[in-house]
Amino acid sequence: MGMPVLIDDLDQDNQSFYRFCGQNELRVQECRACHLKRLPPTSACPFCSSEEMEWSLVEGKGVVYSYGEVHHAIQGAFKPHLPYHLLLVELDEQKDVPKPYDGLRLQGNLAEADGGLAKVETIKRVGIGTRVKVVFKRLGGELAMPLWTIDEDSVQPENPWRYPIE
């Protein structure tokens, strides 16, 4: 969208995450001690405090856990795309682990399959429970941003729950 993206060189965890995205791979940290996956990337496991981890490939499919529909752009570059959705997606991997209602969740904008922000027709089809899959938007260099698009190959809920704003 013409806005610069800067990830500080000292932030190795996020640098690695977005580099994997640049290779069209959604990878998350997995603790070598307790074997639980985590998002966002951190320097230690939030479950057992171990600093030992490896990057684990995940499928990049999940369900809309929550969303926000933005009608007022704070950044001018987003104004032509109003309204747009910011999704909180619960990945299929590690659902309800280590406890019920825990899971791997990742935020990202709703997009079309080509990585462009979703059109109004697409936005109206998405709500809590919609099945989505990851797509990657190049940021330049070796980095990419994970975005979400409707998973047309999955069975979708007949009426996904939507906030009553219309």
Image (cartoon, helix red, strand yellow):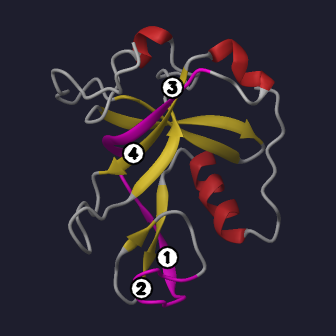
**Residue visible at 65% across and 43% down?**
144
Q: Is mark 2 on a helix, strand or loop?
A: loop
How far is the residue under mark 2 from the one under mark 4?
Answer: 24 Å
Q: Which of marks 2 and 4 is nearer the N terminus?
A: 2
Q: Which portion, as a residue range, is magenta?
A: 44-71
Q: Nearer the viewer, mark 4 or mark 1?
A: 4
> Quadrant location of residue 48?
bottom left
Q: Distance between the residues labelled 4 and 3?
A: 13 Å
Determine whether the residue tagged by mark 3 lies in a helix, strand or loop.
loop
Would you call the spot at circle 3 few (<14 residues within 10 Å), some (14-19), or many (20 or more)?
many
Q: In which quarter of the image is the N terminus?
A: top right
Q: Does the magenta stretch include residue 102?
A: no
Circle 4 SS class = strand
Residue highlighted by disc 3: 111
Q: Is residue 116 left or right of 11 when viewed as pictured?
A: left
Q: Residue 89 carries which label?
A: 4
Q: Are marks 2 and 1 in contact (CB under 8 Å)?
A: yes
Identify the amino acid type marked 2: Arg
Which mark is nearer the camera, 2 or 4? 4
Identify which residue, 89 or 116, lies in the foreground.
Answer: 89
Regarding mark 1 in the picture, which secondary structure is present there? strand
- The disc labelled 3 sits on which kind of residue? Ala
- Horizontally, is 16 left or right of 126 in the view? right
Give the Cα separation between the discs numbered 4 and 1.
Answer: 22 Å
Q: Which of 55 and 40 is in front in this view?
A: 40
**Residue 33: horizontal and vertical position, in percent?**
39, 90
Q: How far apart are marks 2 and 1 (CA)?
A: 7 Å
Between tags 4 and 3, which lies in front?
Answer: 4
Numbered mark located on residue 54 in the image: 1
Residue type, numbered disc 1: Glu
N-terminal label among 4 and 1: 1
